[in-house]
Image (cartoon, rainbow, N blue to C red):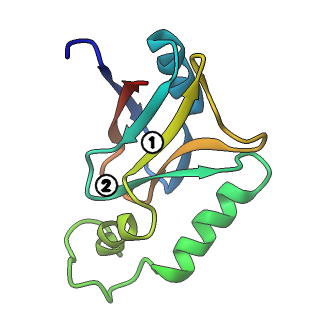
Amino acid sequence: MPGIMESTVVRVTTGAREVVHDITAECERFAASAGGDGLLHVFVPHATAGVAIIELGAGSDDDLLAALGDLLPADDRWRHAHGSPGHGRSHVMPALVPPFATLPVIGGRLALGTWQSVALVDLNVDNPDREIRLSFLKG
């Protein structure tokens, strides 16, 4: 059935540092343009990035990076060893922070909780150019 799903790609540059990058505004704009009720699927087609629904700006983003640093240290233990030191951990991270999230949309608005934001989580300092595919499935 034509027109049941709309999709777009958002490009972001994360820089040369580990980052929790807020993509809520991009998701909100796309959901509003698609309109109506449905599901917004957020997907990063990268082996070293994830999507998190998390409070941003109150320290939780830094806490997430610190927790991932504790769980996945940037050292030489990783068998996947090309790139910057600890690069292999970036390939393990999507098993903990998956590369996707699906959000309800009601009346063209994301149905997030008061303190929830949508974020790209990127530990890979070797690749700062990221794509995020947003797909809206109409209800």
Q: Quadrant of the C terminus?
A: top left
Quote the CA–CA distance across marks 1 and 2: 10 Å
* Helix, strand or loop for disc 2: loop
Above or below residue 108? Residue 18 is below
Q: Would you say 62 lies left or right of 139 here? A: right
Number of marks: 2
Circle 1 residue = 14
Examine the rendering and report whether any part of residue 94 can be seen. yes
Quadrant of the image occupied by residue 134: top left
Dots 1, 2 in contact, CB < 8 A:
no
Marking on residue 81: none
Q: Would you say 1 lies left or right of 111 here? A: left
The residue depicted at 36 percent of the width and 44 percent of the height is: 128
Identity, as a three-letter code, of the amino acid under mark 1: Thr
Looking at the picture, tell me which residue is in the foreground, 41 or 99.
Answer: 41
Q: Would you say 131 lies left or right of 59 here? A: left
Above or below residue 47? Residue 96 is below
Looking at the picture, tell me which residue is in the foreground, 129 or 116.
Answer: 116
Classify mark 2: residues with Cα within 10 Å, few (<14), some (14-19) or many (20+): few
Examine the rendering and report whether any part of residue 23 can be seen. no
Above or below residue 108? Residue 44 is below
Residue 50 in the image, given as x and y percentages of width and height: 41, 54
Q: Quadrant of the N terminus?
A: top left
Identity, as a three-letter code, of the amino acid under mark 2: Asp
Residue 77 in the image, given as x and y percentages of width and height: 32, 89
Quadrant of the image occupied by residue 45: top left
Marking on residue 126: 2
* Helix, strand or loop for disc 1: loop
The residue depicted at 62 percent of the width and 71 percent of the height is: 66
Looking at the picture, tell me which residue is in the foreground, 31 or 65.
Answer: 31
Q: Would you say 59 lies left or right of 30 here? A: right
